[in-house]
Image: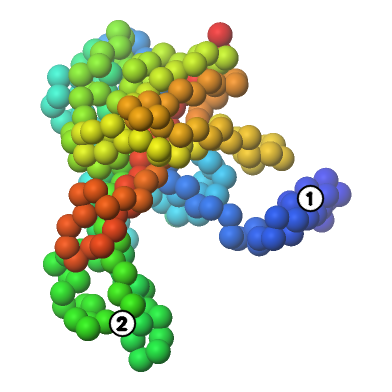
């Protein structure tokens, strides 16, 4: 083993032991990563990677499962992929493929303006209950719940889950039409354009839950490249009474923003609680 590699491995192991976790217990994070977020020229292209990993924007765990990407692969029964053009129409992913660690697809930006690329999953259910003295866990939909979970299950807890993963890409002059909320789940409504972010400047966004301001939502922001630094350097903030958050970018780079809320708002039977999450990839440019 090379001395430098051995030293690095010992540092990582010691750090994990110090905080009382194993290396494999680090959080897995889902993300979309575009080849570029601001483009010019006639009908430019981008490539988007989609994955779930420990280190942000580094492929080492498994692909983010997307419907319509790598459809011939039986493993890919995933969440719907949406590509919204500046005029509100839907674009289709091109050249989709699935590898061991990532899904990938191309998008041709045939219109001038800002596109929204989103992976949206809604209405999923997670349940836990006790059966014959053993704690069981279940995941499915409202349709499968009735036939797969015992009717008289003890200690039953059912959580409804809604998630949204997004990125924004602009060809030519930026536009704002794709910022119109859908009114479903936890969403980000930009005040500062997400393709106009610069280091050492502040940006404002509004969080909405089912179209209304989401207050007291904790937001975490992490710059990519954690693999190459010893500290996570996360930024945390909480939305105010109008759902507003402000983020000051310490330096240029790709950032991962995550917000999550547990609430009783919008819960539908058989769920008794709801977890809504939002993730965005944002590129911050140097001054």
**Which residue appears at 50% of the width and 33% of the height?**
237
> What residue is drawn where x is 17% and y is 70%?
144
Q: Is residue 38 visible?
A: no
Residue 154 is tagged as 2
Q: Residue 244 falls in which quadrant of the image?
A: top left
Secondary element under disc 1, as helix, strand or loop, is: helix
Of all residues shown, which one is farthest toward the right? 3
Give the image location of residue 93, x and y in percent: 25, 36
Q: Position of residue 114 (x, y in %)?
A: 28, 18
Q: Which one is in front, 104 or 265?
A: 265
Of helix, strand and loop, which one carries label 2?
strand
Q: Which residue is mark 1?
A: 11
The color scheme shown is rainbow
> How many neighbours does mark 2 have within 10 angstroms: few (below 14), some (14-19), or many (20 or more)?
some
Task: In the displayed orientation, state which residue is furthest to the front.
Answer: 241
The mark that comes first in sequence, 2 or 1, is 1
Identify which residue is drawn at 21% across, 34% down.
211
Q: Is 36 in front, or is 42?
A: 36
């Amino acid at each position: 083993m090379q001395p430098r590699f051995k030293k690095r491995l010992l540092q990582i192991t010691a750090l994990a032991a110090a905080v009382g976790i194993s290396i494999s217990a680090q959080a897995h994070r889902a993300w979309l990563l575009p080849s570029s977020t601001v483009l010019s020229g006639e009908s430019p292209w981008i490539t988007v990677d989609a994955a779930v990993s420990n280190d942000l924007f580094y492929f080492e765990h498994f692909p983010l499962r997307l419907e319509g990407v790598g459809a011939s692969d039986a493993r890919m029964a995933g969440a719907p992929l949406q590509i919204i053009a500046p005029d509100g129409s839907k674009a289709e992913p091109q050249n989709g493929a699935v590898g061991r660690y990532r899904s990938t697809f191309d998008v041709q930006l045939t219109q001038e303006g800002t596109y929204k690329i989103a992976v949206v999953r809604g209405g999923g259910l997670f349940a836990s209950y006790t059966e014959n003295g053993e704690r069981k866990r279940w995941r499915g939909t409202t349709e499968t719940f009735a036939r797969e979970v015992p009717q008289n299950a003890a200690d039953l807890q059912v959580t409804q889950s809604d998630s949204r993963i997004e990125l924004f890409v602009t060809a030519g002059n930026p536009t704002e039409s794709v910022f119109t909320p859908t009114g479903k789940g936890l969403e980000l409504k930009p005040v500062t354009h997400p393709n106009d972010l610069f280091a050492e400047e502040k940006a404002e966004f509004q969080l909405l839950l089912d179209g209304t301001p989401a207050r007291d939502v904790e937001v975490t922001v992490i710059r990519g490249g954690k693999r190459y630094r010893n500290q996570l350097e996360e930024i945390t903030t909480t939305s105010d009474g109008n759902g507003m958050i402000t983020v000051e970018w310490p330096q240029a780079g790709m950032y991962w923003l995550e917000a999550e809320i547990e609430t009783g708002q919008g819960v539908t039977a058989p769920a008794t609680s709801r977890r809504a999450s939002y993730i965005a990839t944002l590129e911050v440019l140097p001054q």
